[in-house]
Image (cartoon, rainbow, N blue to C red):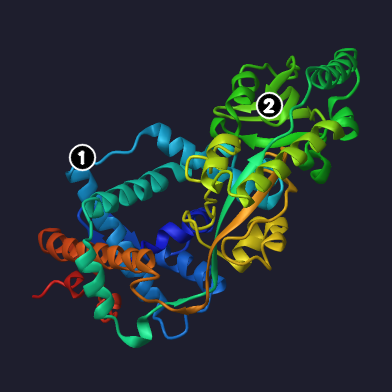
Amino acid sequence: MRKLFYSVFVTTNLFFSMLNAQNPVLDKVVAVVGNNLILKSDIETQFLQMNKAGDYEGIDLKCKIFEDLLYQNLLTHHAEIDSVEVTEREVSDQLDRRLRYFVQQVGSEKKLEEYFGKSISQIKSDLRENLKNQLLAERMESKITEGVKVTPAEVRLYFKNLPVDSIPYIDEELELEQIAIYPEIPDEIKLLAKEKLNEIRERIVNGENFATLAQLYSEDPGSIANNKGGELGFVGRTDLVPEFTAVAFNLKEGEVSKIVETQFGYHIIQMIERRGELINVRHILIIPKVPSSEAYKSKTRLDSIITAVRTEKMTFAEAVDKYSQDEASNKSNGLIINPITGNSRFKLEQLAQVDQITSLQVKKLKVGEYTDPYEFYDENGKKGYKIVRLKSRTKAHDANINDDYQVIQEMTIANKKHEAISNWISKKSKITYIQIDDSFANCPFTFTEWIKKK
């Protein structure tokens, strides 16, 4: 499906456009789409960045960028006509995310401000309108394709008509199911963790440095790795778990919270600075430790469960339903979802990337076999034990309709969406005022409708 190029490069190009604005050059309008103008500088700044980012050999890159900008502006023009909207909150949330990304890249907000010679508030003001237009364009594109569906017959016909050299090659893939349980942490262990954190808080209240104590005692891997004394950097509400957010956003500058419990453990938080809907805080995390006795109980329990499955006293699906404590998989017979693709299939390198321990455990399994119980840590750093079953293993092959229906269905939907967008461009370009500078009139456009016949 045709994608908006700007959706891939939006963050970088927005900032490069700002940089270009600090060094004004003679500019000119190279196109008008409805009420929207496309400037030569819009193309040049994207060209410089994209030329560095990838290999576009054989592509007239400036013409490609220009056509993508025509499409973007056609979308935003008709979004306004059709009363398509994005809220100021949506714009602010996206703006905050992208600013955080660039702050992380350059190291601090101060360095970002120095780089552009502007305050954070000025940078946000400069970016807001461009970002709003891009979100409008994305929403308009979604509106154009929202009703696109395909039938099984259409999927088969699409595959039948695919040229041989366009049939996708499917790498070896695995599907996995699991039973996961977590050891209980006794109340007395939790109490010890809270007492330790209260002692640290008392030392801070009595004048000791929060950052120093965070570096000495915090068990947050991020704080240990970045050597910033527990400082998170500027974050928004959606970047933090709800319990942490509720407390952190109500602190005054310099104030230290009482103990906050989250899925990660126990925290105390200190407000460093607040800027609108962004906050910079420090925190100290203490994680209650799983006693070896409880870990042993969990492993032994899993041994009993898998023995019952192997001796056919219960099915694997029944064991998942009765015992598994992993909320993401226990409602689907333990099926593990690939976070990279959103489906249940893992390429071998993807599995190693997502979960190296499991990739080693299942390496020699045959379909239908189980691992022995083994220790793991979930995405929140919580310790548990699991058994994994190899549900399927698909050898590398050229795609076929029987084994790879989902892949071909996605291709069919993408193709149908592309057709919907093409039809929309053809229809709307005829009724929209579009004027293109002669310097781009000979571009090899995908859609010839951009050039109005005289």
Left or right, 375 with respect to 33, comes to right
Q: Quadrant of residue 419?
A: bottom left
Examine the rendered structure and indicate whether residue 42 appears above or below residue 203: below
Q: Quadrant of the N terminus?
A: bottom left
Residue at numbered disc 2: 273
At 36% from the left and 61% from the top, the residue drawn is 4
Q: Quadrant of residue 448?
A: bottom left
At 20% from the left and 50% from the top, the residue drawn is 78
Q: Can residue 114 be seen?
A: no
Q: Quadrant of the C terminus?
A: bottom left
Label 2, label 1: how far apart the Cα atoms are: 38 Å
Mark 2 Cα shell of 10 Å, populated few (<14), some (14-19), many (≥20): some
Examine the rendered structure and indicate whether residue 87 appears above or below residue 17: above
Q: What is the x, y in percent for residue 55?
A: 52, 79
Q: Quadrant of residue 183?
A: top right
Left or right, 82 with respect to 379, comes to left
Q: What is the x, y in percent for residue 142?
A: 29, 51
Q: Nearer the viewer, residue 359 or 440?
A: 359
At 70% from the left and 32% from the top, the residue drawn is 264
Examine the rendered structure and indicate whether residue 133 appears above or below residue 429: above
SS for callout 1: loop
Residue at numbered disc 1: 83
Sequence-wise, the earlier of marks 2 and 1 is: 1
SS for callout 2: strand
